[in-house]
Image: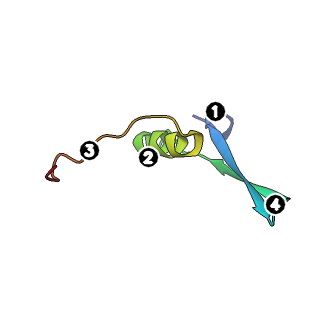
Amino acid sequence: MGAQDRPQCFFDIEINREPVGRIIFQLFSDVCPRTCKNFLCLCTGTGFFQPNPREKQ
């Protein structure tokens, strides 16, 4: 998988409601696919909550 095949996501940065830039992340989904999937879910607000099976409810 080349660099062009890797997914990207971004955060837009604002200071006092004024846009000041964008941070672009290239995700190495070929190296750590689970981490990348979790990060994309965090960025997009998608996915679902899975309780930790080791925690008492």
Give the left or right position of residue 22, taking residue 29 as reference: right
| Among the two numbered marks 1 and 2 on one chain, the one whose residue lies closer to the N terminus | 1
Residue at (30, 40) in percent of width and height: 50
Of discs 1 and 3, which sits in the foreground?
3
The span from disc 4 to disc 2 (Cα, nearest Å) is: 30 Å
Residue furthest to the bottom in view is 16
Question: Dividing the picture into quarters, in which one does residue 48 lie?
Answer: top left
Q: Do the residues labelled 4 and 2 touch (CB within 8 Å)?
A: no
> Which mark is drawn over residue 17?
4
Residue 32 at x, y percent in the picture:
44, 45
How many numbered circles are shown?
Answer: 4
Q: Mark 1 points at which residue?
A: 5
Around disc 3, counting alpha carbons within 10 Å, would you say few (fewer than 14), some (14 to 19), or many (20 or more)? few
Which percent across, then down, holds residue 49? 36, 40
Q: Mark 1 or mark 4: which is in front? A: 4
Q: Where is residue 13 in the image (x, y as percent from the top left)?
A: 75, 59
Q: Which amino acid does label 4 sit on?
A: Arg
Mark 1 against mark 2, which lies toward the viewer?
A: 2
User: Badges 1 and 3: C-beta atoms under 8 Å apart?
Assistant: no
Label disc, if present, on residue 48 of the rendered structure: none
| Pointers 1 and 2 in contact (C-beta within 8 Å) | no
- Kindly state the secondary structure of the residue where label 3 is placed: loop
Disc on res. 35: 2
Category of crowding for the residue at label 4, using alpha-carbon neighbours closer than 10 angstroms: few (below 14), some (14–19), many (at least 20): few
Kindly report the distance in space between the C-alpha atoms of the residues bearing marks 1 and 2: 17 Å
Q: Mark 3 points at which residue?
A: 51
Q: Closest to the observer: 43 or 29?
A: 43
Could you tell which of marks 4 and 3 lies nearer the N-terminus? 4
Q: What amino acid type is highlighted by mark number 1?
A: Asp
Q: Along the line of sight, which residue is nearer the eye, 27 or 9?
A: 9
